[in-house]
């Protein structure tokens, strides 16, 4: 009966609702840019050692990107899975300590030990999900906070784990390269340029291929947007390969900073093109949003390049100033943040993310349509822990080792502030929040030692000197309270009211022969046991090894009464 | 008897001292709209909660059979997989998601819900989503709430929310709907419309319905078979006309026996 209704007629009835609040985003971006300017000014006008200033900028950004990756992971748990994990820093500690201990006892083997760090964090994540079945949110939060503290207390008191002083660890890459062999070329050299051309060409070819496909059913502009949506991911993949090759010195006689910057610039250009086009194409979409957000990441390469040219044409030996391994930690941490971001984006748009949000909204209702709580929460926690386990070793690089006091609960709370102010369940917002809050704190640190009479002499009426760092924490705290009361959804609210994503893809529903025609698609559909080729799922109890195992665990954990 | 699709025998459920169910037995026959009525607190909702696994039946309960599967100790999330789905007395949707997204949560075995395939098989789950969106739009249109597909579920009116809850169930391709007061608080015109649609579902889609309802006019005119519960027991069953004449039923509702029915 309802199967025959004409879809087009239904769509005509639609009352489109628009997302509001671009002004808030704009305000956020202005604040961010202002902070950036103050930060750079404060850094470059404190002290006279260019080398030191430059290193500070780079390590600041390294830290910011690492925190952004942490915040993205926490956001998955809090914003999507809906479980308040207040022991996030415990997860980081598990990953970091696993990595360092293996590295120092087993000999350096980065890839293998990052893998074990991921595994250790995953196991911890799975264990931490189990109590969520019996505990209400607030009690779950208490359990996680305790778990995080237990981890810290253990490593602090156990000599095997370095005790209070921790374990020192120097990134073996830094050991291998002396500083000035790290950046051999400031500008891009021939081989690197060739490489850049090749990967741009590959991306373009893939894009044209996809564009043709989209063009069959979409307008040319919309096909373009669709194509660019994939193009940035394709390019990200090649960009990462480029970073690694450049870093390993495969490209030419030495790493070239120019290549890395050009790669970043190309990557962000694609993102900006996508956002701009999106604005032109969409007639009923919130548009300013896309442009603002599309342009915002450009801040990073622009800053790098401005700083770079400033140094290039300032007096002194530029090559020695710029030849710092910190470039690589910064670029590496940026890359992993971008990977984390793309992972979280897939979680955002995929049916898995949708199911997680449903469970967050109303778990009983989700169960009543057949969505298991434990299995889905585990999926969310597995992805979140995976990201943490992957990023934790980079945090170790940054800290040059591990010490228990790096893993105080305060860090978890700062991550929370980042996601609340940025926007829970909005990945772009989370990155924004992470950059803004951490930049605020770092700027304050720089302002303490800035060569500026006004700021140095700033004091309270009762004569005490003003400490910018205290103020950074006060501002953060006040911001948190203001946001929780007046705008709990943050600078970048969770995207709601928007079904365009689904309706744009609606044409796919009538293209049944696609799968038969394309070998790749039919292979994928078979491998994933899609209902597209196997038909409606049978009415049967799902049974496989994992769900049976889970049931047993669950029976142990589950109490008798679960009210409706 | 092969045309019985659901059977719950001698179900007990106690909340401490409160004996909410004391040996309730209910059968649903294929093709018959079955209703469950009874005074407030007689254990109807508790019965739903027990048979859908949200509450555990007491040890001394009999079997619960749905389509030849024994579902007595099954976790609640597995029961929809067999084709039996329920609404809640207090409507529960996913308030922070759009109406369309609410509908898209329901389908079983979506490729994109798997941890690995959500990352690796995007073209496949995009296509699955498209098929589901199409179906969702048609169901929304059928329930006459297609125009609000872009609203958040929490922004719908009470009646629309009830419709959405039914729509979400239809997305699971069910064979038995358990509806707990689907029209409580809905205006009579819309209530009648909803019932017409429920009848439609039964007749055209072959979806069976077990209904809890307090509105006697509606129950008597739409049901094929009625179970009357009081104090956790089924005190009478039969077709509407025989129930209307049953003295025990009137006793249960009014607490005394009137002179004439
Ligand atoms: N979670 C619970 N804990 C304790 N007692 C409960 C619980 N749920 C229900 N009860 C009790 O069980 C009895 C039956 O309740 P139930 O909700 O099944 O009634 P009902 O028939 O659905 O009534 P109504 O028509 O008002 O919805 C009531 O006495 C109620 O107080
Ligand atoms: Mg009830």
Image (cartoon, coloured by chain):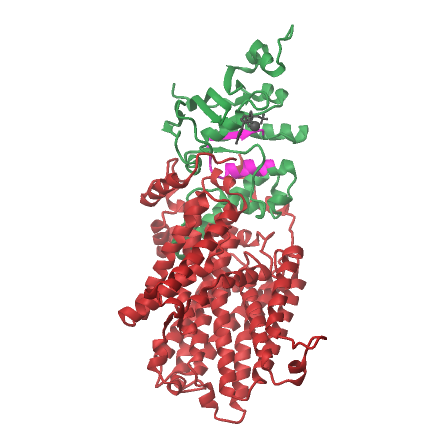
Vertical placement of residue B73 versus A336, above or below: above
* Left or right: where A443 falls relative to B49: right
In the image, is residue B170 part of the stretch drawn in magenta?
Answer: yes
Which of A473/B99 is in front? A473
Q: Quadrant of ligand 1?
A: top right
Answer with the quarter of the image where residue B165 lies: top right
The residue shown at (66%, 63%) is: A24
Residue at the image position 49 percent from the left and 86 percent from the top: A51
Q: Is residue A349 visible?
A: no
Residue B46, horizontal then vertical, whole percent? 51, 28
How far from the left and from the top, in percent, is residue A259?
43, 80
Residue occupying the far left of the picture: A106
Extent of the magenta region: B162-181
Which chain is in green here? B
Chain letter for red? Answer: A
Q: Is residue B166 magenta?
A: yes
């Amino acid at each position: 009966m309802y199967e025959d209704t004409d879809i087009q007629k239904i769509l005509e009835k639609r009352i489109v609702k628009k997302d509001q609040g671009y002004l808030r985003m704009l305000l956020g971006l202005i604040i961010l840019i202002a902070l950036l300017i103050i930060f750079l000014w404060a850094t470059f006008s404190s002290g006279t050692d260019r080398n030191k200033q430059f290193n500070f900028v780079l390590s600041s950004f390294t830290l910011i990107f690492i925190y952004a990756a942490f915040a993205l992971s926490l956001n998955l748990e809090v914003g999507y899975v809906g479980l308040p994990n207040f022991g996030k820093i415990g997860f980081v500690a598990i990953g970091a300590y696993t990595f360092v201990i293996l590295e120092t006892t087993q000999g350096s083997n980065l890839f293998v030990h990052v893998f074990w760090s991921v595994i250790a964090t995953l196991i911890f994540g799975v264990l931490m999900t189990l109590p969520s079945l019996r505990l209400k949110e607030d009690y779950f939060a208490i359990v996680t906070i305790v778990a995080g503290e237990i981890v810290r207390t253990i490593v602090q008191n156990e000599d095997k784990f370095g005790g209070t002083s921790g374990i020192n660890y120097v990134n073996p890459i830094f050991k291998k390269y002396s500083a000035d062999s790290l950046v051999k070329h400031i500008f891009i050299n021939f081989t690197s340029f060739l490489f850049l051309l090749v990967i741009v060409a590959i991306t373009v070819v893939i894009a044209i291929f996809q564009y043709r496909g989209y063009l069959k059913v979409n307008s040319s502009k919309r096909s373009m947007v669709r194509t660019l949506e994939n193009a940035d991911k394709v390019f990200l993949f090649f960009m990462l390969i480029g970073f690694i090759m450049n870093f390993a010195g495969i490209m030419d006689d030495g790493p070239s900073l120019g290549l890395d910057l050009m790669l970043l610039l190309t990557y962000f250009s694609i993102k900006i093109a996508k956002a701009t086009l999106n604005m032109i194409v969409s007639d009923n979409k919130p548009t300013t949003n896309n442009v603002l957000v599309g342009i915002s990441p450009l801040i990073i390469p622009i800053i790098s390049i401005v700083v770079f040219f400033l140094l290039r044409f300032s007096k002194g030996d530029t090559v020695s100033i710029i030849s710092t391994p910190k470039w690589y930690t910064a670029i590496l941490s940026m890359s992993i943040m971008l990977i984390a971001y793309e992972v979280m984006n897939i979680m955002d748009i995929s049916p898995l993310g949708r199911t997680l949000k449903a469970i967050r909204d109303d778990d009983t209702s989700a169960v009543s349509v057949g969505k298991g709580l434990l299995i889905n929460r585990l999926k969310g926690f597995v992805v979140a822990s995976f990201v943490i386990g992957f990023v934790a070793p980079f945090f170790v690089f940054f800290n040059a080792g591990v010490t228990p006091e790096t893993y105080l609960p305060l860090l978890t709370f700062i991550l929370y502030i980042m996601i609340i102010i940025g926007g829970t369940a909005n990945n772009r917002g989370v990155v924004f929040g992470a950059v803004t809050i951490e930049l605020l704190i770092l700027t304050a640190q720089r302002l303490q030692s800035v060569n500026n009479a006004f700021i140095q002499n700033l004091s309270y009426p009762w004569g005490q000197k003003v400490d910018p760092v205290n103020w950074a924490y006060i501002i953060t705290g006040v911001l948190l309270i203001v946001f929780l009361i007046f705008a709990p959804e943050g600078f970048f609210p969770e995207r709601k009211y928007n079904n365009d994503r689904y309706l744009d893809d609606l044409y796919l529903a009538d293209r049944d022969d696609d799968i038969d025609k394309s070998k790749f698609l039919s292979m994928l559909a078979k491998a994933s046991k899609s209902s597209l080729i196997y038909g409606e799922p049978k009415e049967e109890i799902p049974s496989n090894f994992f769900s049976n195992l889970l049931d047993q665990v669950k029976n142990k954990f589950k109490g008798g009464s679960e009210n409706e | 008897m092969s045309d019985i699709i659901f059977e719950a025998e001698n179900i007990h459920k106690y909340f401490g001292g409160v004996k909410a169910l004391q040996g309730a037995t209910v059968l649903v026959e294929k093709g018959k709209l079955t209703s469950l009525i009874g005074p407030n607190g007689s254990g109807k909702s508790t019965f739903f909660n027990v048979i859908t696994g949200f509450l555990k039946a007491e040890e001394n309960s009999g079997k619960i059979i749905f389509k030849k599967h024994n579902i007595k100790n099954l976790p609640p999330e597995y029961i929809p997989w067999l084709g039996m789905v329920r609404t809640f007395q207090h409507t529960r949707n996913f308030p922070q998601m759009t109406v369309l997204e609410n509908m898209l949560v329901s389908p079983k075995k979506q490729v994109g819900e798997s941890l690995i395939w959500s990352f690796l098989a995007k073209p496949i789950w995009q296509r699955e989503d498209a098929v589901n969106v199409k179906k969702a739009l048609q169901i929304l249109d059928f329930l006459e709430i297609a125009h609000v597909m872009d609203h958040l579920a929490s922004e719908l009116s009470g009646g629309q929310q009830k419709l959405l809850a039914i729509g979400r169930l239809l997305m699971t391709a069910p064979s038995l709907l358990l509806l707990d007061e689907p029209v409580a608080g809905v205006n009579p015109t819309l209530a009648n419309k909803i019932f017409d649609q429920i009848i439609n579902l039964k007749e055209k889609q072959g979806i069976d319905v077990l209904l809890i309802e307090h509105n006697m006019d509606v129950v008597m005119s739409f049901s094929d078979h009625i179970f009357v519960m009081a104090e956790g027991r089924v005190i009478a069953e039969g077709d509407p006309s025989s129930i209307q004449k049953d003295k025990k039923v009137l006793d249960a509702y009014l607490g005394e026996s009137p002179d004439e029915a």
